[in-house]
Amino acid sequence: MMFYVRTNSALLQSKSYTRPFALLEKIKWNDFSYTTLFRLYVYPKDSADRVQIGQLKIMHLGQKTEEDTFDPEIKSFDELSNLSKEYCSLGDELTYYKSLKTIDGSLAIKILKQLNDVSFNSNIRSKFESDDCFNSSLLRYSESKEALDKGASLFGKRIIRQIEFSATIPVTEEKNYKFNFNFNTFKGLPHRVNLLVGSNGVGKTQVMAKLAILLSRFAKDKFDDNKSSLKKLTEAGVIEPRPSLYNVIAVSFNAFDSFELPSIKQTKDFSYSYCGLRKDDSSYYSEQELAGKIQKLLSSLDDLKLKKAEGYLKQLLHYGDDEKITSSSNYSNLSAGQKIVLNILLHVLNKITPQSLILLDEPETHLHPKLMTSLFIILTEVLIEFDSFAIIATHSPIIVQQVPSRSVHVLKRIDNIPDLSEPVIECFGENLSEISRHVFQTAQSDRDYESIIDELLADNFNDPELVEELFEGRLGMNARMYLRSKAVLRSQND
């Protein structure tokens, strides 16, 4: 079957060609100055009509910016593999493959083969995966990555699911953090959440902002002669391989977060959304405005998500079973923390789709520990429901306690050199004071409860009973264990 390349579909006189044949209409659009976009029409053999399949991108290996995919003399071809350069194609989104599926099955597969489709032909994919044009143009949007992973499954191939990836994130000049994020199941352990922990100044917020850019491919600046959008994207770091995560939800109620703020259109184009205190004009939402956003978010949920939201909100606000949560309810009387929690939860429910990634920066900010724990538990349920994942930057031992150490990344700077490590203890279910000491290194820099107990023992004749009386019998088990073991040790040394 022949393919004809034209700049305008009207220039093709279909009666002059033998059916079946296809038209590739060149579209004057670029991704970071790479011009690769076409629209595919198929003219079936037994029909007078043509079928518009949809948009796809075609490139050749080593294609440069400002360079056309095809040389000017190429007006037609039967197979891309017969041309002098090495070419591949990829549907711009999953609907391209669904449209192909509607035509004759053998013809659809023939088209995929003739166009060297990288979703259908995994053998050629490795040739292009490290090519700048492939990553900057063919995989520009999250929908394109989903098409790569799932398009060929409509024709009997397996779905690609890549949810382990490395991220090299620059935080100082020529200094990087190198992460390995793994969301694969492992022997039944919790696996949907990875944590970033570390003291202030190690770069957690900066890392989160750059992950948002790299995973959504969003850069706020307009495409311009200086290619500032591409520069911002490349300066954010490197993700390898591109994970099967098709939607990024950035959440932060830290007034100093560094997340890019997308417009409504950009939110749709890049499958990237932001929820937080900041507005585009550099101002901040007031408590009253946060209450108003709750009503808007509730009213925008579909019936199924609204039903789930009502259950979660009753759980968070301790409403009775007979109390109705609706978009007309008055949320102005809620505490600031409750308004923030509801904004987070409802924004996530509003935006989440299967295989989303939530980037949650310091959820403990403004929240009581009990409310924060309830939010974490509910978000975990939402992640499971929507087969999604989260990276959370936190200072909270309570959150660290919920996650296995294999999913906890401890960030440090040693002589201003970024350093990553896994906790030396197993965090899941561990005592909060042990997490604070071993993960957040509180004992290395702060005067903690153990040093105070040491002094109280010395002042009370090394008698643990007298020390416990000072706390009116309410001293916790962990402190009592330390108190009594320390008393025994002192007695042995006397």
Image (cartoon, grey):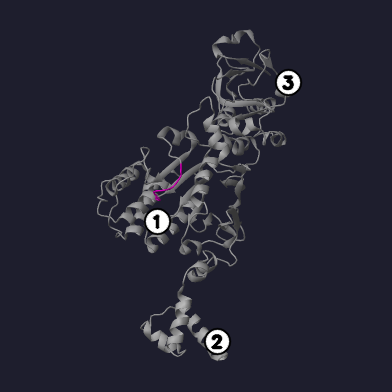
Crowding at mark 1 (Cα within 10 Å: few <14, some 14-19, many 20+): some
Q: Amino acid at mark 2?
A: Leu
Residue 51 at x, y = what percent? 55, 20
Residue 19 at x, y = what percent? 64, 15
In this rendering, the answer to whether 248 lies above or below 426 is above
Tell me the tag on residue 489. 2
Q: Nearer the viewer, mark 1 or mark 2?
A: 2
User: Helix, strand, or loop for circle 2?
Assistant: helix
Which of the pair 302/289 is nearer the observer?
289
Who comes first in sequence, dot 1 or dot 3? 3
Residue at the spot of label 3? 83
Which of the pair 233/212 is nearer the observer?
233
Marks 1,3: beta carbons within 8 A: no
User: Helix, strand, or loop for circle 3?
Assistant: loop
Q: Nearer the viewer, mark 1 or mark 3?
A: 1
Q: Quadrant of the N terminus?
A: top right
